[in-house]
């Protein structure tokens, strides 16, 4: 009697670790993982990969003394068995026993995927273990067929545009959409949503499950996040109606659950085949970017092209990351610019990571590889407050004597304010934002006594720390983000004023500087200012002075708080005396010293209540921790209104 096997179901290979071996089968052979399962009664873990019409199974023992563990000890990693589908397994086993065929299993038992299985002894097959698995009896519900159909559909969705296009993506130094998600999220935490949605437009010669975007949710360090990832292997990641609906649906879920939202962008823009509905899709995304601004943190990661109207979604989000060499953003590409204006420029020089991080200010972070960029996204999220999680208690800290030596007493000497920040903050916690743009002001997150804070600081190393158009824009947006998400603000001040010059005046320094005033005055989170050296003129007021809402202002003994620098003030106030003296230079130095002593130190401001206390540099960290701890439960009522009118 013949067994009448239906077909080869799978080939099984015994391995010591599925996790170590799966990379070879996925990345080198291009197979797709379709199922994983732990079978307790057999003490094995299994992983199935689709391989054309059949499947490949990796088997890992849960214990060394299990049958598969014993197999590995005797024979090492390699072919374990061949599995064939058949019907009426019980009858087939009876028939084999009657033919005196040696069986390992005389009755069917439960195997992977809930199938009924049995093994023929390798003594009968020249050392090859044969598995028989039942595909379902006639008249049964054929659940296995439904399960297999679901696996195939999931496989099709996971393949996107196919292995060839995935390999093309990797050759460009880019990960696939699903690889990016795996890299970003905690292991095995991703839950995909709407993988079977397809475009309904007949203009497409072929439709793809998922329609070129992967959406869902997962965790980062245990914290829930929602996200989308463009799949460049499907229509170049271009956005169509269904594609947009998937993104807006997951944005709505993120907002309902008050969780951060992340977009992994790699798209050619609007899908031309679908016409105006593609543009409408962008409109729905932009609307939600604005609607949920200040409600949930929104992060954009540019890992490929992001052109045309598509760039406005990242521009509306809170933080933008870019991968160097592959991430690009522009409204009109190089070819259009050349055609319209005659200017020649390549895509990287027009809208690459370097340009947007250092020149335009459209991006906040960049990384050499996608893995590096995604690791930075994980790090940034660690500074955002967790909902339903209380803050840890403030740390008891010893003094930081190095602070006594970091700031030169001579106001004309530059230094790096980041060294001061590093001494004020918990060790190795300062995370700078936009480090290459408007370098005369430093912004970023840190922890102070284990609590996350936002920091805005003058940078005397660049333009003497003076305020400029770009610096005001950079700081203002950061301040408003911190205020929206209840992150306390520390301002470290050493500012000589607004940068003078025709370019700044004609560029609108008045309007842009007013943004900084507006942002500080509008913020209701705990706000503390530390003046370490200069605080001159209108810039002193703008940098979170007591007058515009600072809760506490501290100053070092070396601080100079005045309408302008002592030398300039003395030159104006004592102009006649200086000119009339026998030695004008000597007279100028004398009057400058007198003015500085009488008017520019911190004590006059302290006498008028504009400074709450004058503190030693080395005790600054301790005092700041105490200040923010005291302000933990701060509440501040403001006049009811629809919104203010920030001078954009």
Image (cartoon, rainbow, N blue to C red):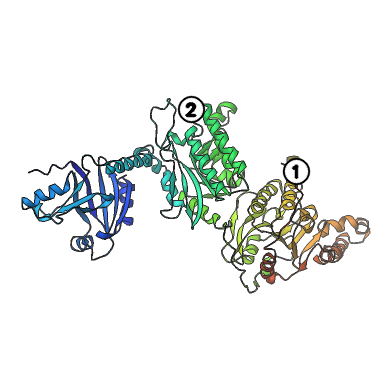
Q: Quadrant of the N terminus?
A: top left
* Lower position in the chain sequence, tag 2 or tag 1: 2
Q: Where is residue 48 in the image (x, y as percent from the top left)?
A: 29, 49
What's the residue at 23%, 46% (across, down)?
Answer: 10
Q: Position of residue 623 (x, y in %)?
A: 69, 69
Q: For mark 2, does the 10 Å Cα neighbourhood hold few (<14), some (14 to 19), or many (20 or more) residues? A: some
For disc 2, the marked residue is 274
Image quarter for residue 534? Answer: bottom right
Q: Do the residues labelled 2 and 1 touch (CB within 8 Å)?
A: no
Considering only vertical position in the picture, is 187 above or below 393?
above
Q: Is residue 427 visible to us here? A: yes
What's the residue at 61%, 70% (across, down)?
Answer: 395
Q: Where is residue 304 in the image (x, y as percent from the top left)?
A: 48, 41
Considering only vertical position in the picture, is 235 above or below 366?
above
Left or right placement of residue 607 versus residue 352 in this view: right
In this view, the residue in front, 310 or 503, is 310
Q: Which residue lies furthest to the left in this view?
A: 99
Mark sitting on residue 511: 1
Left or right placement of residue 68 versus residue 174 in this view: left
Local SS, label 1: helix
Residues at marks 2 and 1, CA–CA distance in whole angstroms: 42 Å
Considering only vertical position in the picture, is 599 above or below 482?
below
Left or right placement of residue 77 versus residue 269 in this view: left
In this view, the residue in front, 190 or 575, is 190
Q: For mark 1, does the 10 Å Cα neighbourhood hold few (<14), some (14 to 19), or many (20 or more) residues? A: some
Q: Position of residue 621 (x, y in %)?
A: 66, 68
């Amino acid at each position: 009697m013949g067994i009448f096997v239906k077909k080869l179901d799978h080939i099984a290979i015994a391995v010591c670790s599925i996790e170590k071996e799966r990379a070879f089968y996925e990345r080198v052979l291009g197979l797709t993982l379709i199922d994983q399962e732990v079978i307790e009664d057999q003490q094995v873990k299994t992983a199935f990969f689709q391989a054309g019409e059949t499947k490949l199974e990796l088997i890992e023992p849960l214990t060394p003394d299990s049958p598969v563990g014993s197999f590995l000890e005797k024979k090492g990693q390699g072919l374990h068995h061949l599995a064939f589908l058949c019907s009426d397994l019980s009858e087939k086993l009876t028939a084999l026993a009657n033919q005196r065929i040696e069986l390992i299993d005389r009755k069917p038992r439960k195997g992977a995927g809930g199938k009924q299985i049995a093994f023929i002894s390798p003594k009968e097959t020249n050392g090859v273990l044969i598995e028989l698995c039942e595909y379902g009896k006639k008249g049964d519900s054929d659940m296995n067929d439904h399960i297999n159909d679901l696996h195939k559909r999931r496989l099709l969705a996971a393949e996107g545009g196919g292995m060839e296009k995935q390999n093309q993506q990797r050759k460009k130094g880019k990960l696939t959409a699903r690889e990016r998600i795996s890299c970003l999220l905690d292991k095995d935490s991703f839950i995909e949503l709407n993988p079977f949605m397809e475009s309904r437009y007949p203009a497409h010669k072929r439709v793809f499950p998922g329609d070129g975007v992967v959406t869902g949710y997962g965790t980062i360090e245990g914290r829930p996040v929602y996200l989308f990832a463009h799949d460049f292997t499907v229509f170049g990641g271009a956005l169509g109606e269904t594609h947009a609906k998937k993104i807006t649906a997951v944005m709505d879920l993120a907002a309902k659950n008050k969780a951060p939202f992340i977009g992994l962008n790699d798209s050619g823009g609007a899908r031309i085949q679908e016409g105006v509905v593609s543009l409408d899709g962008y409109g729905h995304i932009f609307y939600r970017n604005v609607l949920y601004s200040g409600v949930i943190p929104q992060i954009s990661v540019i890992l490929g092209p992001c052109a045309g109207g598509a760039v406005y979604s990242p521009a509306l989000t809170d933080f933008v990351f870019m991968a160097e060499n592959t991430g690009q953003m522009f409204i009109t590409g190089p070819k259009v610019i050349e055609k319209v204006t005659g200017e020649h420029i390549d895509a990287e020089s027009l809208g690459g990571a370097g340009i947007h991080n250092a020149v335009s200010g459209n991006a906040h972070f960049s990384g050499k590889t996608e893995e590096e960029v995604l690791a930075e996204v994980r790090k940034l999220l660690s500074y955002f407050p967790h909902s339903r999680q209380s803050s840890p208690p403030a740390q008891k800290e010893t003094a930081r004597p190095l602070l006594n030596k970091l700031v030169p007493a001579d106001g004309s000497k530059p230094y790096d304010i980041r060294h001061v920040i590093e001494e004020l903050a918990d060790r190795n916690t300062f995370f700078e934002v936009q480090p290459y743009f408007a370098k005369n002001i430093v912004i970023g997150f840190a922890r102070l006594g284990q609590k996350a804070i936002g920091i805005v600081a003058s940078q005397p190393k660049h333009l003497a720390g003076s305020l400029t158009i770009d610096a005001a824009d950079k700081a203002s947006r950061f301040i408003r983000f911190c205020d929206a998400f209840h992150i306390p603000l520390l301002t470290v001040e050493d500012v000589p004023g607004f940068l003078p010059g025709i370019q700044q005046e004609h560029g609108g320094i008045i309007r842009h500087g007013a943004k900084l005033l507006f942002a500080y005055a509008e913020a209701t989170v705990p706000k503390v200012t530390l003046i370490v050296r200069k605080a001159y003129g209108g810039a002193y007021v703008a940098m979170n002075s007591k007058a515009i809402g600072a809760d506490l202002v501290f100053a070092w003994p070396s601080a100079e708080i005045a309408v302008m620098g002592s030398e300039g003030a003395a030159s104006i106030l004592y102009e006649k005396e200086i000119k009339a003296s026998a030695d004008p230079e000597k007279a100028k130095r004398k009057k400058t010293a007198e003015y500085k002593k009488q008017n520019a130190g911190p004590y006059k401001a302290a006498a008028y209540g504009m400074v709450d206390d004058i503190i030693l540099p080395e005790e600054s960290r301790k005092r700041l921790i105490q200040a923010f701890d005291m302000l933990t439960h701060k509440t501040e009522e403001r006049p009811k209104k629809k919104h203010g009118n920030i001078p954009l």
